[in-house]
Amino acid sequence: MRPRQRGFIHRLTIAPTLFRCAPRLPAVMILLAAVAGLIPWPAARAADRVVNVAVMEATPPFSYRESDGTLTGFNVEIMRELCRAMKASCNFEEVKFQDLPAAVSSGRYDYGLANFLRTPEREQILAFSAPYWRSSSSLIGSVRELEKPLVEAVRGRTVVVIGGSRQFAYMKRLEGELKKLVVVRHLENVWEVLNAQEADFTLLPTLAALPYLMSQTGKDFTTIGLPNSEDGLGGTVHVVMPKGRDDLKAAIDEAIGAIRVDGSYQRVNRQYFPFDVF
């Protein structure tokens, strides 16, 4: 068989007002009237309304910390825009991917962003927003690997995946055909295992793999074949929230539509990806 050409990832080019009811009254008079119960308190300002948001920890380009400790990433910046549209402020906390569904379901957080596809199992404990991007999965291996269909490529080989992910579920069904299935907790651990030559391949969300593959440190790896979206490996991605919170769902769905219309979604998109992921 002829050596395969570098995958499609390497052919990408990056293109990359308080008290409105009485505006003429002096502020002191309004405050005294409110304290006395003569007029109602005004609605909370945007900065006064806080939504608690869980994001995955250490998962570039979706959620990660800059060298100065600033939390950023596609999911983080999209959620900041959603909070702006909802006239709220975000309180972010980083949570392990495997722990995030239960943490949101319990009501500890209002929203969770962990690149969740909608599945029957997850729908039992979580509510889902309207889609905010589309996902696919790609098999990643050495640039020296031959071009083969996914199942054929991994037969008799070692594959590393992130535990609890849809990619883990898929490879678990193929485990009998593998030499070994290595399970790790974080994306950075995937690259560590591959670089240590402790696995031949990984199966990852395509967009999660993109920054590493386009970096100097990822030059020895590429996609094997085209992205996959069948058999649970792709589909629409949603913000999750506790079941029964119709107020949260209505607010987030309206906000997703709003940031698509005002262009802020596209602006954030271009910061992280060279194509529209919606």
Image (cartoon, rainbow, N blue to C red):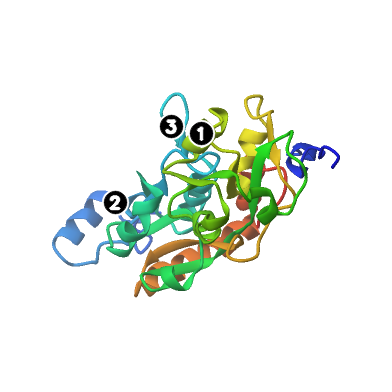
Image position of 250 (left or right of 29): right
The residue at the point 48 percent across, 42 percent down is 63
Q: Earlier in the sequence, mark 3 or mark 1?
A: 3
| CA separation in Å, label 2 and label 1 | 65 Å
| CA separation in Å, label 2 and label 3 | 40 Å
Can you say whether 152 is above or below 129 in the image?
above
Of all residues, the one furthest to the right in this rendering is: 2
Give neighbour class at mark 2: few <14, some 14-19, many 20+ (Cα, 10 Å). few
**Residue 109 location (% of width, % of height):** 32, 57
The residue at the point 82 percent across, 37 percent down is 3
**Residue 247 location (% of width, % of height):** 38, 71
- Residue 70, disc: 3
- Residue 26, disc: 2
**Residue 124 location (% of width, % of height):** 38, 74
Q: Determine the secondary structure under disc 1.
A: helix
Residue type, label 1: Val
Q: Earlier in the sequence, mark 2 or mark 3?
A: 2
Residue type, label 2: Pro
Please tell me whether mark 2 or mark 3 is closer to you in this view: 3
Image position of 143 (left or right of 33): right
Q: Locate the C terminus by quadrant.
A: bottom right
- Residue 193, disc: 1
The residue at the point 68 percent across, 49 percent down is 153
Please tell me whether mark 2 or mark 1 is closer to you in this view: 1
Q: Nearer the viewer, residue 29 or 203?
A: 203
Q: Determine the secondary structure under disc 3.
A: loop
